[in-house]
Image (cartoon, grey):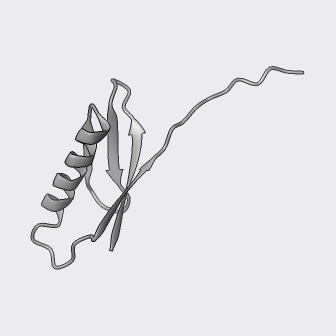
Amino acid sequence: MELIFEVRDAEEGGYCAQALGYAIFTEAETWDELRANVLEATSLHFEDGPVHPRLVQLHYVKDELIPVEAA
């Protein structure tokens, strides 16, 4: 089983991550801290369950709006 987190820039700085299909959410100031928080949150979420993810994917999404001037 692979667990995918959608990672976005947090408005106040740092990152926020949400697991797709699961109620797992975490935040961090740095990428390394986010990795640790994601692993901890995943471990806690699946602690008592019969199935545990074997891989965690961090999918970083960066939204950027680029204005297009009329020609």
The residue drawn where x is 16% and y is 61% is 43
Q: Is 41 displayed left or right of 69 in the figure? A: left
Identify the image quadrant of residue 13: top left
> Relative to residue 59, is residue 33 drawn left or right?
left
Instruction: In the rendered view, tell whether residue 41 sits above or below residue 71.
Output: below
At x 34% / y 50%, what residue is drawn?
18
Is 56 in front, or is 19? 56
x, y percentage for residue 45? 17, 61
Instruction: Indicate the position of residue 68 as horizontal and vertical percent values.
Output: 76, 25
* Residue in view at x 21 percent, y 77 percent: 51
Q: Position of residue 48 (x, y in %)?
A: 9, 71
As drawn, which residue projects farthest toward the bottom?
50
Viewer-proximal residue, 33 or 16?
33
Looking at the image, the residue that sits furthest to the right is: 71
Q: Quadrant of residue 65?
A: top right
Q: Position of residue 33 (x, y in %)?
A: 23, 39
Residue shown at the point (21%, 72%) measured from the top left: 52
In the picture, the quarter occupied by the N terminus is bottom left
**Quarter of the figure with the C terminus:** top right
